[in-house]
Every structure is written in C-alpha cells, then in structure tokens.
Image (cartoon, grey):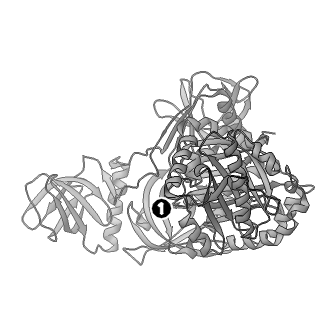
Amino acid sequence: MHVDTLDGMPSRESLLGYRVGTELNAVASFGGGDSPGRLVQLSLEHLTLRLESRAVPRPGQPASVVVGHGERWATLLEAEVMGVHDARPEVSLRFVAPPLDAGRRIVGVLESLRDHGLLLTPETRPVWRERIDRADRVARICEALAARQARGVARTEDGHRVDITAAAFDALDGKILWRFHGEVPRRSFSLEVFGYSSVVHMPVREWREESGLVVMPTPKELVRFRHRWLRRTLASPTCVLGFDHPLWPQVHVRRALLDVSYEGLSFLTEPGEDLMYPGLKLPVVEVSLDGRAPVRLRAEVRNISSMASGRRCGLSVRPLDNEGARAWRALVEVQMHPSTEAAGDWNSATWKLFEHSGYFRLPGKQPSDFVGLREKFSETQDKLAERPDLGYRVVRPAEAGVAEATLSVVKPYAGSWMAHQLARHPPAGLRTTAREALRDIYLRGYEPTQVDPEVKWFFAFCEANVRWVRYTKFEFATWYQQTGQTCLVPFRLMEAEVNAAWVVPVGIDVGAPTEEERARFFEHVASTRPEAYREALDLVPERFDLEVTRRDWDNAGLGRERELMVARHAGRPVALAVVETAQPGLNLFNVLDGVRLVSLEDDALPEVQDAFMALLSRAADWYRARGRKVFVHYVEAECVEYVERAALADLGEGKLWVMSARLLPEFLEHLFESTTPRAG
C-alpha cells in the first residue's frame, strides 16, 4: 500500500474570474493612444492585461478596453486601473459600475472563450492518492462496488468514454462483471468507478463479453483518488437556492441544488441569466427545503464547469452565526443521512434498546447495575442536545419512538472525538440487515466531526473479541499503523467500587507530583506509548490539565476533571496515576471515569505493585469526594499482582483504537465498503 496525501486541508487559491489562454488579444486605451496586450484574466468585475507597449498607467486612471480585438465577438468595456505590476508588465483594471447589459456581454465573451477552449481550467489536484495491492482488500472493494451497482466510466487513451455499472463479483473464480452502456472499447482501457467519496481507478488489459456483460479478472491492485475532504450528496429535488446578485440586485437567482455538503453546494447555472464566475462573493444566500425554514449563508463561487446537462456552479458556504450553523447542519444531514436522526427526544427509546440488545449484559455487568443511572443518562443527553460541538447521539429509528440502533460520539479532549455506546436490536418484522444499520449510524456519527476545526484524532475503547470491531476498526488500524497515524493499545478493563475496603501499603506515600516528577512522567510516557495514544488522550504537557476542554464542558453544564498523582517509596517516585472523570451518565460503563497507572521502574518490583495499590486507594477517595460509586481502571502493566489484591471486577479484554483525523475519509470509505449488504 502506498499513500500520497497533502499535509492538512487543501488550500483555496484566491482566484477572481477565469484565467485565459495566450491567444486572446486585447487593446487598452489610457487616454494617450492604444496599448495592445494579451488578456490574462477576466471576470464580471475586473480583467488583467499583459501589455506589449511600454505604457505605464497609474492607479485610478480611467481606461477603455477592447477584449477580443480582431474577433467577431470583440466588445468594448469601460474600466479603471487598479494596479500595475512592473516586474510583469501587467495591469489590473476594474469595470466602472458596469450596467447589466455590459455584464451580459462579458458573460457572452466568457462563454465564447470557453467554447473556443481559451478558458484555462485549474488543475484538480487530489488530496489523497492510495495504491491498494492487498488481495483481501481489493476483493472487498470489488465486492462492495458490485453489491451497490456502482457507476463509473471506461476510458480509452484517446479520451473516448463509455458509462458503466458494476454488475457482479465472483470471489471464488476471481472475476468482476460490468454492464457497459455503450460500445465496449476494442483496445485496452481503464475504469474509473465512483466509491463512497472517492474514485477507484483500475487498468484493464484482459476481458471478454458474456451474456451481455463484460467479464474481467479481479485486478491485482487499485488506485484510489480523492479530490475533496468532505463528501457531497445528491440534493433533494425540493432543495432550492435563492439570492440577489451582489453587483446587479435586480437579478434574482433561484435554482434547484445538485448536491450539498457541510461546506459547499452546487447547482446548474444559466451563465447569461445568473452572471456567475469564480471568486464572486455572495453576502447572503438562502437555501430552502420543504418542511424547513430557509437557512441563510454567506457564499463564494469556487468553480464553474461543463456537464452534459449544462454549466455546474460550485459554491463554498459558511453559516452567518451559530444558530445558522446548526440549521445548515440539520438541513444537510437530513439529505445526507435520511435513515438516521441526531435530534429529538430519544432517551426512552435508547434505554429500551440498551435493555433489549444485551448492552446491559456485556462482560461483568447485569441490568440491575444500571438502574440508578437512567435519570442521569437522560439529563446528560439533554444537555448535549444543546451542544452538538461537544457530543451527540445518533439513532436509526425503526418506527415512531422505537430505535433499531444507536451510537454516541463525544469530544472529551481538546482535539479528539470518541465513539461509544453502540447498540443494535431490530424489532420483530423489521427487514433490515445488521450491515445496513451499522453503516448508517457509524457514517452519521463520524461525518459531522469533519467540520470541527480542532479535530485531530478519533479513539474508542473497544472490546477485543467482537468480530465486527476487528473487521472494521482493528483491521483498518493495522493497514496504517506504520505511518504513525493509528495505534492499537491492548488493556484489560477493571471496575472498582469506591467504598471497598481500600488499604494503603506501608511505606508508600501518595501526593501531588513536583514539577520534576511531572516532567519525568511525560518523559516516560513519551518513551513507552505511541504518539497517537499520547496526543489523542492529551497526555502531553501543554494539554494535560484539560484547561480548554474543562471550560467548554463547564459552559455546557457538564463536568470534566483530571489530576495527576504520584506514589513514592522511601521518598523516591516509583509510579503515577492519571485520574479523570466526566459528567455522570455520559457513558454507562464509566470509561471516562478511569485511572491509568504509569510505573517509572520495573512494574514487577514489590514497591511498584504497592505503589499501584496505594494510587488506586487514593483514586477511590478522589472519586468518593465527587459522588461516584465506581470507577474503572485500564490495566496496561505486565505484572498485575496488585489487581488481585484490590479485588477489582473484570469487565473484559479491550483495545484502545486511535486514528488520525487525516484518515477519516479513508475510514468512512472502509466502513461503507465493509458494511455494504451483500448482493442478493
């Protein structure tokens, strides 16, 4: 596997209008004779000329320009000099209050240039390129493409293209079948097939036609390209964009949308009517959808491209305020994820789902352990409903008031999101598969986090032996572990009762660490834990105290704390404990009310085992003072004699799964492929 990716989010060039080819002549007059030149850039607001003469106009000087000099579509435009670039003999001019008919003439020029191939389309650089050559992964991708009858094109070297559809995949015989909607090329060609949010490329050198289908061997490798970080989805037929043109307010644009995403949208534009061009800023646009109040946004035209059905105009959009951001997110998600919901009162339905699915009977637990948590659970969910930037719950409704599946997502650290509380139980008679339900709630759970400007990591405390988790999260982590962007850290989850008979071993002193001891803690963690682990859990000096996180959670009426404790033997620090807590009811297994122990010496030493025991005892006091009845401990040490002494309850073997946010689009693609229902 080979990956090429840009560092961070793709930058957006500031481009106003269109760059044009080198063949287009223009003549500018600055009041002292004509100055011939070459048109470099053109929009409805400005143009840039590269002058051939030595004329040096001054900013603010009036000018007139004949664009397309000597061409049948030449047009005269009045302008004002905005700037002169001496190093490059170029002059930028702004049109002076152009009347509407002048704007339409400029559009006519632009469309003529496009028809003559003189508009330079910016090269689209993929933000991600990955070569996939693992046979099992190639087969899984092919199976998913066939199961959902993915669309694509077959393209020859001379540019001829034919639309295609994936028809079937035979893993045993090693072949994939395609339906060609046109003549099959006679020479070698390549396929470009649309995945969840990427394009899969595969060269084809061997094929045969059989029963109206084209049969090919399963490729030995695929190349996946991605051109944007955020997926777009087809818009509802009733989703409409409307705005007044910022230059000519008498021009009102109203168009049905083609697609939407959290940060953009597109529509078919009529150039002569709508007067759109790249770089045009739209102070206010309204997007409406049947049954919802219109959402007001600010927008900028990013590109205009040609399609078989006409000209496509793509906009980047930003909400005007926080309320608008929430409304826009809801409008996008109702179209992007129509089978799931993240709003509404689902507390009772979710609790019933936990009861029926067996969630309350996971290792070491029984339903009676959760009875006292129901009210706190509902209170916390209600608070999060007002702060989706900190966390939210996704449900897949089966019917009114009944949930088939649920997943919660929360942001417990500065740049990290945690998925938790997954459950599924289909009501009797519901004709959906587990793959469909898991796909829908996971995609809805993870995709909204992409608009968090602080997102850097994702993590989850996973049961180690659940097949579906191994198949999705663990397998994905192993593919990218060598890049440092994922990690899997095994642990054993233990639960402790706060009011147990805790005993502090003789000779161990527990207290707050000194600055030197704190520094040793961070040095030891840096040398013994993966970077992804440390960064995702804020186990780094600059974020350890959760200052920003605590402030955000406090503002939402939610609790979040962390403290570092040290255990000393004969005055020598031998072990430390990271003790933290979160709002009661946030996670019903208390995975954020946890103690993590770190030894500075060999953990098999008796004094280290005593130190671990003493730190757990002090942690019990800490949790008792905060009204907790239990806390959990992530056992990562090799010598665990102290666990038996503490009589902790075993909740099972687990793995901490961590993934960089840079890999989220790939993980979503992997989830989509892994959970696509099998054909038939």
Residue sitting at 21 percent across and 62 percent down? 92
Question: Is residue 474 visible to the viewer in this orientation of the structure?
Answer: yes
Q: Give the secondary structure at mark 1.
A: strand
Q: Nearer the viewer, residue 68 or 256?
A: 256
The N terminus lies in quadrant: top right
The residue carrying mark 1 is: 315
Indicate the position of residue 608 as horizontal and vertical percent values.
67, 45
For badge 1, the amino acid type reads Leu
Above or below residue 118? Residue 62 is: below
Above or below residue 532? Residue 501 is: below
The C terminus lies in quadrant: top right
Q: Nearer the viewer, residue 533 or 467?
A: 533
Residue sitting at 61 percent across and 61 percent down? 563
**Residue 400 appears left or right of 613:** right
Residue sitting at 66 percent across and 70 percent down? 559
Quarter of the image for residue 93 reads: bottom left
Question: Is residue 461 visible to the viewer in this orientation of the structure?
Answer: no
